[in-house]
Image: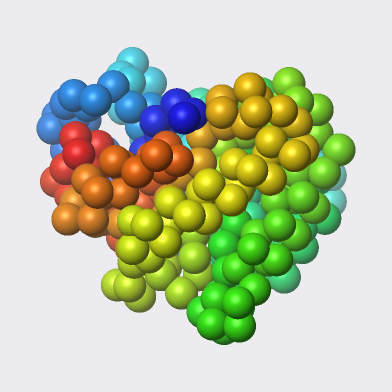
Amino acid sequence: MGKMIIAGNWKMNKDLDEAVQLVEKLKKGFKNKNKVEVVICPSFTNLSSVNEIVKDSDIKLGAQNMYTEEKGAYTGEISASMLKSVGCKYVIIGHSERRQYFNESNQFLNNKVKVAIENNLTPIYCVGETLEQREAGKVEKVIKEQVSEGLKDISADDLKKIVIAYEPVWAIGTGKTATPQQANDVHVYIRKLLVSMTSEAVAEQISILYGGSVTPETSNELMGKSDIDGALVGGASLKADSFADIINY
C-alpha cells in the first residue's frame, strides 16, 4: 500500500471569490481523522489566492496541468516553475479530459511527468479505459500502454515520487462508479505492471488512487480495498461538506 492521498480536482469551476469561500469553509471543517494526504487542485487563476489560505495547514496545493517547457513563446501555457512559485506541490498529468479534448499522447505525457519530477512536483498521472474499450475486453491492454509508455525511462527512485490515478473514463462525471471490486482489480493489475518495471518493494510504495464519480457514499468501501490508496475526486470536491466527508471516510 502506498501513502493514502485524497485529491480534489476542481476542473474548470469556481471563480476567485467562489474558490476562496470554498477553501475557507473546507479548512474550517477539516478534521482529517485518518491522517491522509489531502490535495486540492483549483484553476490556474485561483492557485495563488488559495495557497495563501492553505499554506499553513495540512492541505496541499496542486495544479490541473502544466507544459513541458520552462519558458518561451508558448502562449497560454504554464510551466512547472510557475506552479512552484505559487505553492504547488502536486500536478495532475494526463487526465482523460486532457487526452480526449487536447489529444495528449502517452509520449507527450511521459515528458510532462519527467519535467514535474525534475521540478520537485509530484505528478498525479491518470490512466483509464473508455466504456467501449472495457466492453471490448481491452482494459488491461489500454492500461498497460498508458502505464508503460507514460512512465517510460523513469528510474526506480523517481517512480517512487509518482502518484497514479485510475479513472475509468465511463465513470467520470456520469454518476456511474466502478464497483469497489472492479476498481481494485485494475489497481492490482497496475501494481503488477509497476513490479515488472521496477520491483515489488518500489511498487508497494507508489500510491494508486481511484477516480470516477467518487462520493461520500462510495468512498468508504473503495478506501477499504487492498490496493486502493485514496481517491481523485471531481464533483464532490466542489462542496466543502462532501469533500470533508470523503477525507474523513
Colour treatment of the image = rainbow
Residue under the point 46% across and 74% down: 170
Quarter of the image for residue 177 reads bottom left
Residue under the point 54% across and 82% down: 135
**Whether residue 206 is situated above or below residue 187 in the rendered picture:** above
Quarter of the image for residue 39 reads top left
Spot occupied by residue 54 in the image (x, y as percentages of width and height): 33, 26
Residue under the point 24% across and 25% down: 34
Spot occupied by residue 175 in the image (x, y as percentages of width and height): 29, 72
Q: Nearer the viewer, residue 168 or 141?
A: 141
Q: Is residue 116 left or right of residue 72?
A: left
Number of numbered discs on residues: 0
User: In this rendering, does residue 26 appear at all?
Assistant: no
Residue under the point 75% across and 59% down: 145
Q: Is residue 163 left or right of residue 19?
A: right
Q: Is residue 182 left or right of residue 77?
A: left
Q: Quadrant of the C terminus?
A: top left
Spot occupied by residue 17 in the image (x, y as percentages of width and height): 28, 48
Quarter of the image for residue 247 reads top left
User: In this rendering, does residue 210 appear at all?
Assistant: yes
**Whether residue 20 is situated above or below residue 159 in the rendered picture:** below
Spot occupied by residue 113 in the image (x, y as percentages of width and height): 72, 41
Q: Nearer the viewer, residue 48 or 7?
A: 7
**Whether residue 193 is situated above or below residue 163 in the rendered picture:** below
